[in-house]
Image (cartoon, helix red, strand yellow):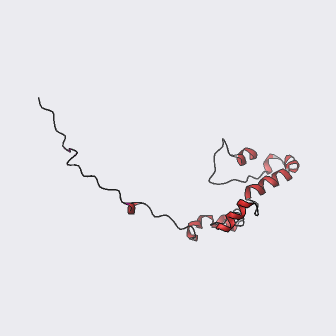
Amino acid sequence: MPKRKSTNSPNETTIEPTSIVSKKPRPKFSDRSLYKESSIEEQHGILLRTYYPPEMTDEQAKQYATGELESPIEIVSRVLSDTKEARRKVKVRDCVVHWFRVDTRSVDNKALHLAS
């Protein structure tokens, strides 16, 4: 008995090349419309653009790298060590958490560990 032939043999199948144009266009980060979700946080002082600008310049990144500017996490660490004794006296109900919204890892997240 002869073998059956498949309906689509490799010679008959056409493979269409993947088009680069089909990929989603990347956003331009200088566009303020991307940050419209954070406008409420900015208005109420929850998001401080002093420390978290919508776009960081090369000069600013260089200043952070060379230590000319103190990074936000260094400021938080310094303030935590300076206020350690005063924070021990604070009742659990009156605590504040410095939370990075995009960082919800609970295993290796130092900020969440210190806040717990």
Quadrant of the image occupied by residue 7: top left
Q: Is residue 27 above or below residue 5?
A: below
Q: Position of residue 60 (x, y in %)?
A: 69, 66
Q: Position of residue 101 (x, y in %)?
A: 64, 54
Locate residue 79 relative to residue 58 in the image: left or right: right
Number of numbered discs present?
Answer: 0
Nearer to the camera, 10 or 36: 10
Position of 58 relative to 78 (above/below): below
Residue ranking furthest to the left = 1
Residue 96: percent from left, percent from top? 76, 53
Q: Residue at x 72, y 49 (%)?
A: 111
Magenta stretch bounds: 7-19
Q: Residue 44: name its quadrant.
A: bottom right
> Does the magenta portion include 21?
no
x, y (%) of residue 39? Answer: 63, 67
Regarding residue 116, the answer to whether it shows in the image is no
Comparing 102 with 66, the one in front is: 66
Q: Residue furthest top?
A: 1
Residue 73 to residue 56: above or below: above
Quarter of the image for the C terminus: give it: top right
Q: Main secondary structure of the magenta part?
A: loop
Looking at the image, which residue is at 85% across and 46% down? 88
Q: Is residue 12 magenta?
A: yes
Q: Is residue 21 visible?
A: yes
Return the residue nearer the eye: 92 or 108: 108
Instruction: Name the quadrant of the N terminus.
Output: top left
Q: Is residue 45 left or right of residue 32?
A: right
